Image (cartoon, rainbow, N blue to C red):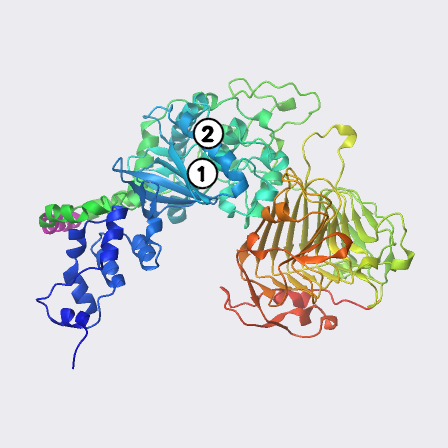
Amino acid sequence: MILPAAAVCVSNPSVKEQPPQGLVDLLARLGLAREEQVRAVGGRVRRLVRDLPAFESVWVDAMAQARILTPYQAVEINAGRGSGLLVGRSAIHEPLRSPGYARVYRAWDLESRRWVRLTLFEVAAHDAAELYRRLKTLVRLSAKLPPECRLLPVVAHGAEGDTMWTVARDVRGQTAAEWMTRHGRFPPAAVADIARQMLAALVVCEQGGIVHGGLNAGQLWLDAQGQVWLPEPGLRPAVRPEEGFGHAELPPEAFDGLAPERVATGGPADRAGDLYACGCLWWQLQAGRPAIPGATGLAKVRAAQTAKIADIRSIAPDVDAALAEAIAQSTCREPQGRPGSFQAILEHLGAGSRRGRRELVQAVRRFGYSFRLSSPIAAVSAQRSRFGARAVVAAGLLAALAVGVWPLTAAWLNRANRPAAEPAGISQLAVLPGGAVEPGRIQPDRVERTDRTTSPRADVVQASWTPPENVLELASNQPQRLAELALSAGQTVRGRGGRRPRVIVPPGGLEIDVEDVRFENVDFMGGPPEATSKSRLPTIIRLRALRASFVGCSFQSAAGGNSRAQQLPAAVEWLGRPAADGAELELPTGSLSLERCVFHRVSSAVRCRGDAALSFELSQVLHLGPGPLLVLEAAPQADEPVSLVMSHLTLRGAAGLMECRYGELDDAVGRIAIQASNCAFVPAEGKGLFLFRGDSAPGPLVEQLAWSGQGSVLARDAPLALWEAAQGRVLAAAEESIQVAGLVRTDVGFAGEADEGPGASRIVRWQVPLASTDPPGIGEGALELPKLEGP
């Protein structure tokens, strides 16, 4: 019997195993290992393979065990992505905590022989030139920052294909977010010391003409000496110059500290926004949780615009008094009410104390992990011989030391972990009429305001006050015909006695013209299409407001099953709200929330006709058509992005998810961000997920369409996008140009016929593996959805 050559080598210990030459060349090119280092692990390879061939993956695993390669590098090389470990002149070592909008790695600079922070982000072709210019300006400004400051500035940038990268200084440590995940909130004195160190670094930023723009707990680094480091000042404003509802695709923690004015106006990052982010971050360090809640990116952005931040002293009564005042003023909703500069806050906090630095050092050392990382990978083998002889002696000494000092250490830890006594008295934040501050407080920028009579910080001071219930109850014993409702802002409309009211609206629709109205468990019925006025399109709800929500509601028309979709009313016609007398110069932002709602026999669930940045949030929604779920009467403009967040939505037999109508398109179209989680899309036969109806090809719109999420399915034969050109010609749009992630095609089976009730539209069969065992589309909550009745 003749054995293969590889088997002969393995079975004969006297024959040395030869590493694959391709692997040797790759590691040399990446600067990760020399050829002699690869050959040195031959003995380990023989022990791993025994009587099997020594594949390249075995050599990679052996080098990972010998700590020549990191686990991340081993995985990438085994997956055939080893060449991607070299970006520019940096070899990737391991991934770091991501800020949400980019991938961040610790890397080894092959030229300077130093550890660096490497950040990668994907860029659309039409944005590349402008972003490259902004990064070039950032590198030029960062080069002027003093090297002794506690900043990790961007020192180089470049591009490789569709990927741009930046290189910044690196530091050994852990983020504040990682520390709080393990241990909760920071000691009060430590938070005050962190605030002082941050302010000193931000003063340097301000003097250098750089707005940081990315301050949150995930981007605040602490080293073992208790020093605070702020990485990559100015990078996020360069990569993401706009924030808001149209850019809510990031994880929720990425929006911590987002200033409300940036959500409302989409303006650029500025010093006032950094001040607000500082206040939110200090609040979080003191409380152990974010200042503004939100389980999704859209929810966090929405809360950033509307939520009130409670006084930190109501949550952490042991907070430093001066810091509590700084937090309250920095988180003022109005930019004019915040302090005038970082230097002003720093002077208000006063000089730091030894106690604060000592508590911070004790916190990061006592509870932290070792900040020491391995040396550059190419030098591991050389260092092993130098330190190997000392390892046994060091281990024995450490064991003896641990036995001797453990009783003292345990007693010290018990004292250190004992909660501090609550101070005898806590001074309340003093706010004077008109937003003035008591003498000795931090003075904001002087801005003349004649139209404001309340304190800009009243939302912080009065956070514990709960307004009386504002509810309008409708009779539920018989159907009601309503042409209008006398509503007030923030009112909830529901049935009397917990029952479902049925509302029959006139052909022109029920007018809603106040903000923040919430309808709960109301069944809306639209009038017959032949009676609709010809002056405007039929609708059930005519919404002339920027914010509204519907929970547990149903929408259907009285038309028969043979009516065409064009004759049916829209469930909600969203007209937005024009600026009153031209007083509002900033771009309005609208948000519409739909939870546990059913749409049947409607031309669309929502038809949008207003000029505003639009945000939709849908959860446990069933749309049976026959029209699309969403109709945009015009293509979004550059300052009017559209955000659509869906969770457990089922679209069945409808004309698609979104229809966009336009004339001629230019390059300045707005972003359409869609986030779909566990949704099911089964359009009617011949219909696609998107329909573009316009005179020109939808290329600019398609480029601005970004789909993210996971666990959603699309009917196997349904096209992704269609273009209805002039004279009604329908063409298929190029699917490869649409960015879609987390959506797979499959055959879908329902529990029953659509007319049998919402529960019959639950998914019971699909043929692709998903991350969750739960079926996509409406879940168990569908059993609680209202059952639709006939006309």
User: In which image quadrant can residue 320 be found?
Assistant: top left
State the image coordinates of residue 766 (x, y, percent, origin top left).
57, 71
Residue 352 visible in rendering: yes
The residue at which mark 1 appears reads as: 286
Under mark 2, the amino acid is: Leu
Under mark 1, the amino acid is: Gln
- Label drawn at residue 271: none
Q: Answer yes or no: do the residues labelled 1 and 2 have beta carbons within 8 Å?
A: yes
**Left or right placement of residue 398 versus residue 563 in this view:** left
What range is drawn magenta here? 390-403
Residue in front for this viewpoint, 408 or 55? 55
Residue 763 versus residue 140 in the image, above or below: below
The residue at which mark 2 appears reads as: 323
Precedes in sequence: disc 1 or disc 2: 1
Q: Judging from the image, what secondary structure is the residue with disc 1 in?
A: helix
Q: Judging from the image, what secondary structure is the residue with disc 2 in?
A: helix
Quadrant showing the N terminus: bottom left
Magenta span: helix, strand or loop, mainly?
helix
Residue 428 visible in rendering: no
In reply to whether residue 543 is colored magenta, the answer given is no
**Residue placed at 74% from the left, 62% from the top?**
625
